[in-house]
Amino acid sequence: MSARPVVVIEDNTDDFAVLVRMYRGIDPALELIRFQRGDEFIRALRCGDVAWPWYVLLDLNLPGPSGIDVLRELKGDAARGCLAVIMVSGSARPADVRDAYLAGANSYVVKPLDPHPYGEQLSALHRYWVGVVASPPGPPGSLGPPGPLGLLAPPDHG
Amino acid sequence: MSASIESIDFLAPGVPVDLDNCAREPIHLAGAIQPRGVLLCARAADRIVVQVSANTELLFDGGVADVLGRSLDDLLGEACVEELLAQSRGADMSNLRPARVEVSRLSARAEAGPGRVVDAFAYSSHEQLIVVELELVELAGAPRFEEFQYHVTSSLAALREAAGVQDLLDTAARVVKGLSGFDRVWVYRFEADDHGVIVSEEKEDWIPSFLGLHYPEGDIPAQARALFLQHGLRLIPDVNYVGVPIEPVVNPVSGAWLDLSGGVLRGVSPMHVKYLQNMGVRASMSIALTVDGRLWGLVSAHHYTGPHHVPNSVRAACEFVGLLTSLLLADKAELEIYDYRLGLVRHQNALLEHVAKGDSVTSGLAGSAHDLLGVCGADGAAVRVNGELRLVGETPPSGMIEVLVAELSKRSDGEPYVSDCVTDDFPDLRDFEDAGAGALAVPLSRLNGNFVMWFRPEWPHTVTWANSAAPVVREENGQLRLSPRESLEKWKQEVNGRSRPWLPAEVDSVRDLRSALGTFLLSRAEQLANANAALSAANAELDAFAYAAAHDLKEPLRGIFGHATFLIDDYADVLDDVGRERLRALVRLSHRMSGLLDSLMEYALIGRNDLGNEPVALAEIVAEAAELLTSRLTETGAEVIFSPDLPIVRGDRARLSELLTNLISNAAKYNQGGQPRIEVSVCRVDDTLTGRRRVRSAVNAETEPWVVCVADDGIGVPLAQQEEIFRVFRRLHAADEYGGGVGVGLSIARRIVERHGGVMWVESEPGEGSRFYFTLPEVTAQ
């Protein structure tokens, strides 16, 4: 298993806790890096402060720029636009789903109430992006050797 | 009154006049003059006299032959002629100013002696002719200048200060009588049909009164009225005069009878003389009253005790009184009308204020009876807006009013209907004869037959005519001949079936009210549109709020659910049965709450999203719904039956699919064992029990004759609950009965139908199954 991380942009700590628990079951060695705001992630990505992730789980409802805004910004970036962005939301509204795909989302996951099926969804998703398809490569230089585990700890979540 | 001389088909001059043709008598071409003076007619070019009245000896030395062919300069003196010509050029017909001439200058005879004077008038009725009239002045009877001046100035003050039209006319009659000394002076007003009414009178005590009498139009025929309009005053000092013919009678220059209408000596129509003689009149004078260029009436004077000479100076003063009265008349009439209008406007304003406060224009108008009637001084009124008829005061029966509305709706001018005798226009409306003899109606909008109408009851009254309208046949010299009316015997005419007439001010008032109401109706429509828009916005906001609230509530709920789940996962073995059961309850309740929130979000979304508008085959939708529900339907053994020729409707495919899914799943759900049988069909509105009432109340039944029916053989819904079941989160059964559910499926179904502009209802009886009906736009049976 590679040392590339998965980035989670999620402001809700409980939801993040659920994710952490789910991913523990999927790949205990995987590094989850959490950002509470989308713009913080984009800044970090552009500055090379964060390693090129396998994919990004992006919550639709965020403080500051909304999930869609962040998605558009990411997909509009010539060098980094190929990053796989998975939208995660409690909303199954067709309009929300359509908007996300039109803005370039690579997948759209509706968070179910029950964590068990949620875990199965995430597991399938992870296997797909890490093991099934060729993962989108990062811009030159971003795929350097991963730093030691813990060096790229999330800025505000230990 | 507007008749002009040009419009009359005159008889040839000299044709004998009788009662049948006197309206065509060319009275301006009399061919003769009154004997109180001499007429000379000369060529304008050389002032040579070509016509003269036969009485030349009155003023000149010599007969007609001696005067004809002489020049005016020779007869009157060059200076005098120049003065007269200058006068005639500057003067219009109504203000001839005489030049005073000593008779001794005209004649050497002794009787023409010192102190005798004539007033000489000159006028031109033909461009190549000049007419000079020489009128003898009776100096003895004429008032002295100071006396006269005092009379005139005090009269003017009295006229100016008159309190109103009636006072003005009374004053004018009094002043003219004082100035002229006639036995009777009265004021005559021409009505709309040109017949006259005596509205004011000043007379000697011993003569009977004429006041209030009506005179037929023919008594002062059109050509006479036209002459009055041209020349302010007309005098006949002695009706028994012997007319003096003009010689030759045909003017050699113009080839026609001389037009005498510009002068003061013109001979009087023999018919008129007869008329006056029959009334015992010896002398008469009339002064025109004109308002806005039309002959409003006359100040007329009669003398009975003998001939009555009025010198030109007095005539001029009387004419001036007539002129001033005319001017003041317009003012004072306007002022009176203005006061009356002001009263009407007050009612209008009060009425509009009332309407503004009321729920509707109808109730606003009808609820303010006093002002509604006051707007035009009516006794009854009807307000008819959008088929609702409200009656106020005394009115004809409502059925008759509806007939009138239907009749008036056919008229296309949009103008007020004004009548003091409705049955004249609509003979079938006999019931209008009493309370609604007269009607005034304004359309608010003709297409809808929206009217406001006012009524006046019959106003039976008597018009007293001065004498019978029938001509009198009289024997004279052994011959029967037509004669003007012999006497002033009064003739009473009963006037029935008519209301008091509507005044122009009253018609204007309702016209004003109509336009005010029009803008008011418009602004109410706008208000309604605004209110609707605001309501829609509020609804949308509420939907948005409900959606956002439900969405946000789900987030912590997911957390609760997650933690409860993890607790069970991680600690199930350290908890006892009670603990585990409580955790499972927590999970179960969270699940249920999530379902409620989902439904709420779904319900809110129906209101928020724009609907598609495409043709949707109902049969496809039903098939899809049945397929979607396969597992549940198989579970219960339910059967969905529908005819493949279900109609095509217009709407949002996804929503309609949701609608049918909800209805079918609902039908499958509420069934007491057995195998539910669900049938989707289309029927006429009339085939349903309550459809016509429901459909008509919401949409036009004419255009929505088809309804879709989803029928089941389930448990049914008691009548009392048939509306309840459509309310959000309203369940008639326990949450775990009939497969559970949050109680929003039917609410969503109805909301989908309503968003499509349709209506939805249920007809059912417990144990007998239910039939859910809904209408949709353009449901077309195939």
Image (cartoon, coloured by chain):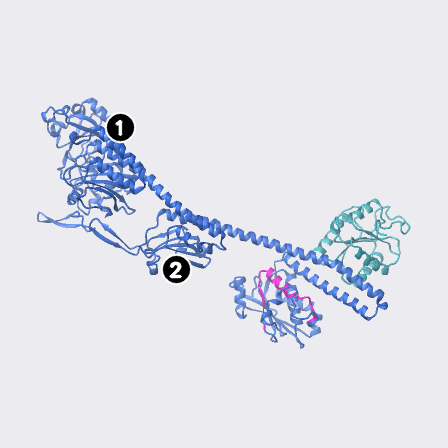
Q: From the viewer's side, name the closer residue of B62 and B185.
A: B185
Splitting the image into 4 quarters, where does residue A91 fall? Answer: bottom right
Instruction: Give the left or right position of residue B674, taking residue B135 as reference.
Output: right
Instruction: Give the left or right position of residue B122, taking residue B687 as reference.
Output: left
* Quadrant, the C terminus of chain B: bottom right
Instruction: Give the left or right position of residue A16, taking residue B134 as reference.
Output: right
Among numbered discs 2 and 1, the one appearing first in the sequence: 1
Q: From the viewer's side, name the closer residue of B267 and B559.
A: B559
| Observer able to see residue B129 | no
Instruction: Give the left or right position of residue A34, taking residue B527 as reference.
Output: right
* Quadrant, the N terminus of chain B: top left
Magenta span contains residue B754: yes
- Find the residue positioned furthest to the right: A148
- Height in image: B272 above or below B739? above
Q: In this structure image, what is the colour of chain A?
A: cyan
Res. A108 mark: none
Q: Position of residue B722 (x, y in %)?
A: 59, 69
The amino acid on which the numbered mark 1 sits, given as a three-letter code, is: Arg
Q: Residue at x 45, y 48 (%)?
A: B516
Q: From the viewer's side, name the closer residue of B441 and B4.
A: B441
* Disc 2 target residue: B403
The amino acid on which the numbered mark 2 sits, given as a three-letter code, is: Val
**Label 1: how many residues lie within 10 Å, few (<14), some (14-19) or many (20+)?**
few
Residues in magenta, as a range: B738-764
Q: Residue at x 62, y 74 (%)?
A: B713
- Height in image: B414 above or below B173? below
Q: Position of residue B134 (x, y in %)?
A: 17, 30
Q: Residue at x 40, y 60 (%)?
A: B402
Q: In this structure image, what is the colour of chain B?
A: blue
